[in-house]
Image (spheres, rainbow, N blue to C red):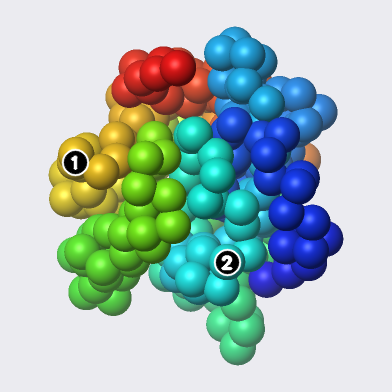
Amino acid sequence: MAEQYSLYSADAEIYDIYEYIALGDSIAKGYALPDPDSQCYAALFALSHGLAYRNYAELGLTAQELLMAIRADMYPVSEVKLITISAGCNDVLAPVLVVLAKTLEMDNSGPVSIIGVNNRLKELFLTEPHERVRFRIEAAIRDVQDNMRIERVCDELTKETLPSIAREIKKRNPNVQLIFTNIYNPYHSRAVFRTTDGNLQSLELTELFRTYAERVNKAFVSTSDYAVADTDKFITGTEFVNATMNGDDVSAISVDPHPTREGHRLIKKAIDAVYKNVE
């Protein structure tokens, strides 16, 4: 984990100034925003509702790592009134990227990163006929479907890890209002290719992640202990995420699933829909 939060565990008085804390991954952190501290959904939500808040989210954090951190009391969950959690995307996206990396003939000896996939795609668009790149991506979409490893990750996430996160927080703070954001599908865009005769072709990328977003969201729903904000209902267009794949603009090619500024505004809106303003 990137941070151990020793500063905050050493000074209990600092907890009292926060009514709301945001936990989770790079989505909650506001990765890729020009000014994450003011533009991420948590900051927008806190400002809108007049809540003193702190963002404890970490880049690359998995739901399992978040659970371990909560059990180790790395976050001040016991005194706050509200906690929002973004967790699970890294767990599900990682094996999807492994499949994509395999079809792109990347080195799979270590962790597969979004940046690594982006760089490989740019290289292929510049060195291979676009029809060949299209064939690779089509193969990845086929291989992702009905993938038992990814299905197991989804089941563990929804049946064990996320409910355990809620239980651990509620043990420490039974009265806290707890809101999870669910998993949205970041790939609503089309991949655009230039054929050897100069014509444009496109390929729908939705199926690269849709099945597993739906699987997680169907299994993990609101209960009496926590609410689930339906971000997948709002993040439905290419303007809401950074992912884009246009062979005519290789410099901009990206499988980055993170929300744009407008995407963060929509996540905030999804949280608004389930938030209960209780004094």
Around disc 2, counting alpha carbons within 10 Å, would you say few (fewer than 14), some (14 to 19), or many (20 or more)?
some
Question: Where does the image place residue 140, in percent across and percent down from the top left?
Answer: 38, 62
Q: Is residue 37 visible?
A: yes
Nearer the viewer's eye, disc 1 or disc 2? 2
Q: Amino acid at mark 2?
A: Asp
Query: Considering depth in this image, is 93 or 37 the residue closer to the camera?
Result: 37
Question: Where does the image place residue 191, in percent across and percent down from the top left?
Answer: 49, 38
Q: Residue at x 29, y 41 (%)?
A: 226
Q: Residue at x 55, y 39 (%)?
A: 80
Circle 2 — which element?
A: loop
Give left or right: position of 88 versus 119.
Answer: left
Around disc 1, counting alpha carbons within 10 Å, would you say few (fewer than 14), some (14 to 19), or many (20 or more)?
few
Q: Is residue 100 above or below residue 231?
A: below
In the rendered structure, which disc, 1 or 2, sits on the residue that comes first in sequence?
2
Q: Residue at x 51, y 64 (%)?
A: 70
Query: Considering depth in this image, is 155 or 18 the residue closer to the camera?
Result: 18
Give left or right: position of 259 versus 249.
Answer: left
Residue picked out by circle 1: 223
Residue picked out by circle 2: 73
The answer to which image quadrant residue 113 occupies is bottom right
Question: Where does the image place residue 132, in percent across and percent down from the top left?
Answer: 50, 57
Give left or right: position of 122 versus 23.
Answer: right
